[in-house]
Image (tube, rainbow, N blue to C red):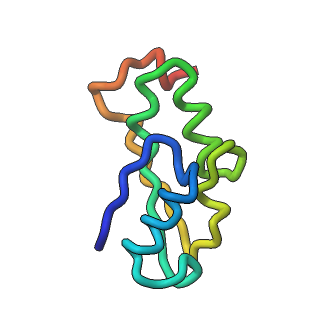
Amino acid sequence: MKYLLTSAGIKNTSIHNAVLDLLGKPIAEASALCIPTAGYAIPGGPGLACKSFTGQATTPMCELGWKSMGVLELTALPSIDKELWVP
């Protein structure tokens, strides 16, 4: 298992190439897991997180053509202020 931490998906050619180098195979043969929780600490973070894995973000992530992509949601963490994730 390999990890790539980005703050905004795959937003330029350099990061895209780093993903390909890290994987050692085409994206279409790889699976990805998105953990958006860190973004919840900023105003509007939950909305931005949702956009990142639904294909609505300005920086692509899910639309790169992964074999499969999952989302690990951790909003129930006690360290996240309730105002940031409760409607």
Residue 80 point in image, percent of width and height: 35, 25
Q: Residue furthest right?
A: 56
**47 versus 67 height, above or below:** above
Image position of 68 with respect to 78: above or below: below
* Residue for point 50% across, 62% down: 70
Can you give x and y, in whole percent of width and height, for residue 46 in the image?
54, 31
| Residue lying at 49% horizontally and 25% vertically, measured from the top left | 85
Q: Nearer the viewer, residue 30 or 81?
A: 30
In this picture, residue 25 sits left or right of residue 54: left
User: What residue occupies the far top of the structure in this picture?
Assistant: 83
Instruction: Say if 46 sits above or below 43 in the image.
Output: below
Q: Which image quarter holds the N terminus?
A: bottom left
Q: In which quadrant of the rendered view does residue 56 lie?
A: top right
Q: Position of residue 54 (x, y in %)?
A: 67, 51
Q: 34 or 3, which lies in front?
A: 3
Please determine whether, in this image, residue 26 is positioned above or below residue 45: below
Quarter holding the C terminus? top right
To which quarter of the image does residue 18 belong? bottom left
**39, 17: nearer the viewer:** 17
* Camera-side residue of 11 and 67: 11
Residue 49 in percent (x, y) is at 55, 39
